[in-house]
Amino acid sequence: MGKSSKDKRDSYYRLAKESGYRARSAYKLLQLHDVFGLLSIPSDAPRVVDLCAAPGSWSQVLSRTLPNTSRIISLDLQPMTPIQGVVTLQADITHPSTLPLVLNHLGGEKAHLVISDGAPDVTGLHDLDEYVQASLLLAALNLAVCVLQPGGNFVAKIFRGRDVDVLFAQLRTLFTRVTCAKPRSSRGSSIEAFVVCEVYAPPKGFEPSLERPLALGMLDDGLGEGATVELADDGEIVEQTENGEVVRYVVPFVACGDLSAYDSDATYHLQEGRESIDPVQPPTAPPYKRAVELRKALGGGGK
Ligand SMILES: C[S@@+](CC[C@H](N)C(=O)[O-])C[C@H]1O[C@@H](n2cnc3c(N)ncnc32)[C@H](O)[C@@H]1O
């Protein structure tokens, strides 16, 4: 497929290049912000951590939207080309050495917002992909609870698979509001969505620690004596507080981006006079780099 045919097919890909964003994902964060106001942080010096951030379009949105007194820390397994006003780190969110690194860059203060767009290399085996995605989300959550200040927000990519209700229930034990959100720039045909977890409110006595990380299935972890969380058959979350009060909670599903926004599954013709332009920032060290080198060495074509 030539680059102009990809431009016609994917309007967010084209818009991203025109606006100087490194990836079309920028629009997912912008559309989430439109609904939840995530980037309107009531602080003169907001502190934000962007996990799994390469090539960096979410960090670009942060850098363009937040005041220049902000502290923005972005990390990824892959190296990232620098972004103005952003500390970029190469690190693995599943590795214990990453938390001290992030805390160090936060200068002893807690973050107002943690975002994670983490995705594994998908295999096409749905159960496996969902499992790896859930593990990545848990790693992001375990990091988030160690760096977020009470009242802070957490956003992460999820795959809406079979066990997603368990995950929602666990998140509900830690945040006052949990919403499942689907930006219009996220393809409708994909099971990708985002959990928007607002107002971090850890239960009394909850001590976040990477030595005892949260895991799926540990719904009651840290809730305190007498408190429970259960999932009803219909997926509703049934919570009982220490005082015996029972609360039922359904995680709302919200579509973000108004109906006039481009539909990411639709094909649009390039308007007259508009030309296809090159990507803003090609990947610095993509996983396929070695394969391209080998193919070239063997006399094949390649980028
Ligand atoms: C969809 S991309 C993120 C796009 C990014 N939000 C942007 O706007 O440019 C997913 C990223 O997750 C990263 N990732 C996957 N597993 C990771 C891990 N264990 N630690 C850190 N990053 C990871 C990948 O390297 C990849 O860059």
Image (spheres, rainbow, N blue to C red):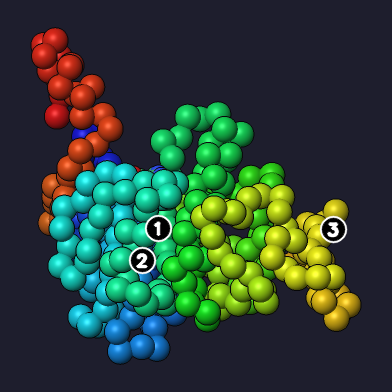
Label 2 is placed on what type of residue? Leu
Rounded to the nearest angstrom, the CA distance separating label 3 from label 1 is 35 Å
Q: Residue under label 3, please give it.
A: 232
Furthest-front residue in this view: 211
Q: In this view, does 2 lie to the left or right of 94?
A: left
> Percent from the top left, x then y, of residue 84?
15, 67
Q: Give the residue at x 60% y 77%.
A: 201
Q: Is residue 11 left or right of residue 199?
A: left
Out of 243 and 282, give the one closest to the viewer: 243
> Percent from the top left, x then y, of residue 73?
29, 65
Q: How crowded is mark 3: few (under 14 residues within 10 Å), some or many (20 or more)?
A: few
Out of 268 and 50, give the one closest to the viewer: 50
Q: Residue under label 2, please give it.
A: 103
Q: How crowded is mark 1: few (under 14 residues within 10 Å), some or many (20 or more)?
A: many
Labels 2 & 1 near each other (Cβ < 8 A): yes
Secondary structure under the numbered disc 3 in the rendered image: loop
Q: Is residue 165 left or right of residue 157?
A: right
Label 3 is placed on what type of residue? Ala
Marks 3 and 2, the one that precedes in the sequence: 2
Q: Is residue 43 above or below residue 265?
A: below
